[in-house]
Amino acid sequence: MSNIEKTLSIIKPDAVERNLIDEIKKIFLKNDLNIKESKKIHITKDEAAEFYKVHQSKPFYNDLCAYLSSGPIVVMVLEGNNAVAANRKIMGATNPKDADKNTIRKLYGISIDKNSVHGSDSSENAKKEIDFFFKN
Ligand code: CMP
């Protein structure tokens, strides 16, 4: 049975800086994730802190927020069958060195911080994250 849903994807500063936007978008499209919305933005550290607030107790939180706000990013709404899980499979493990062959993070990730992409981890968070960037 099909389960068409939406998820939020971010192309992070390390990948935007290396001109990987089109390459990464092609991977989504090839895997039947349609790009319903896309915009290139540069967020503030406070906005990054709000976006990543689920991680606020983690030791890497401050660096994470500084990094996401360090340069332009591309935020996208992807839509497809089981889009949340499909996107996470295409991205690969958080740490590029643990990611499966041909995943985005294996192909392009530099480190656990500069891991090229973010994707929502559940349908519930996908709704919140999409609203964060695309609610007017
Ligand atoms: P992302 O999927 O965007 O979600 C939170 C980010 O925190 C994660 O990708 C990593 O880039 C970053 N991060 C940095 N250190 C860690 C860590 N030790 N464990 C998990 N995520 C980390």
Image (cartoon, rainbow, N blue to C red):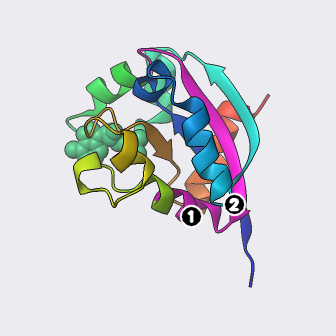
Q: Is residue 81 visible?
A: yes
Q: Is the residue marked 1 within 8 Å of ligand 1, measured from its CB?
A: no
Q: Find residue 4 and report its horizontal and vertical position in percent.
A: 75, 67
Q: What residue type is labelled 1?
A: Ala
Span of residues in magenta: 69-88
Residue 47 percent location from the top left of the image: 51, 22
In this rendered view, identify the residue nearer to me: 108 or 57.
108
Is residue 65 inside the magenta stretch? no
Q: Do the residues labelled 2 and 1 touch (CB within 8 Å)?
A: yes
Position of 68 relative to 42 (above/below)? below
Mark 2 or mark 1: which is in front? 2
Does ligand 1 reach within 8 Å of label 2's beta carbon? no
At a point 45% along the width and 29% down the height, the residue shown is 15
Residue occupied by mark 1? 86
Amino acid found under the numbered disc labelled 2: Asp
Q: Is residue 57 shown to the viewer in this render?
A: no
Q: Which residue bears the numbered disc 2?
A: 32
Left or right: residue 107 compared with residue 78? left
Where 1 falls versus 109 (above or below)? below
Relative to 13, residue 112 above or below: below
Residue depicted at x 52% and y 34%: 11
Residue 75 location, quadrant: top right
Q: Position of residue 19 (x, y in %)?
A: 51, 23
